[in-house]
Image (cartoon, rainbow, N blue to C red):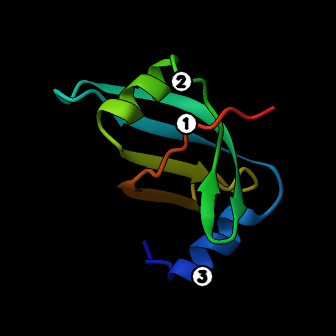
Amino acid sequence: MARMTREEALRFLAEGARTGHLATATRSGSPHVAPVWFVVSDGDIVFTTGRDTVKGRHLRANPRAALTADDRTTPTRSSLSVDRSALTSTRPIY
């Protein structure tokens, strides 16, 4: 599979309403994968989760995460995996 540039990946992720699967892990490395809705804002992938959800607890304990997103029109042909540290905010959203 061809590798996308950062700009191509952000364009792909910004198209329409996107869902993905976010993989997080505890400090000890136990994995957890959950579906998320996300948007691209100023070059960042943004999603919300509660502080005490499994995702929230995992990201506080270990900020590394991976996200996969599929092109639902041709799911077997186009997919993208993003793996990097997640920057989190503990600020409540109202």
Disc sitting over residue 7 in the figure: 3
Q: Nearer the viewer, residue 56 or 17?
A: 56
Residue at x 60%, y 57% (from the top left corner): 45
- Which residue is drawn at the image coordinates 81% and 31% (left, top)? 94
The answer to whether the residue labelled 1 contacts the one labelled 2, judged by CB atoms less than 8 Å apart, is: yes
Amino acid type shown at disc 3: Glu
Q: Is residue 74 above or below residue 29?
A: below
The percent coordinates of residue 48 (x first, y second) are 65, 36
Question: Where does residue 79 sit, x and y in percent of width and height?
Answer: 55, 58
Q: Are marks 3 and 1 in contact (CB under 8 Å)?
A: no
Mark 3 or 2, nearer chain start: 3
- Name of the residue lying farthest toward the left: 28
Q: Indicate which disc, 1 or 2, sits on the residue closer to the N terminus.
A: 2
Q: On the image, numbered disc 1 is attached to which residue?
A: 90
- How much space separates mark 1 and mark 2, taking CA atoms? 7 Å
Q: What mark, if any, has residue 17 been given in the picture?
A: none
Numbered tag placed on residue 51 in the rendering? 2
Does residue 68 appear to the left or right of 12 in the view shown? left
Query: Alpha-carbon distance for marks 3 and 2?
Result: 31 Å
* Three-letter code for the amino acid on which mark 1 is drawn: Thr
Where residue 37 appears, as percent x and y from the top left, is 70, 40
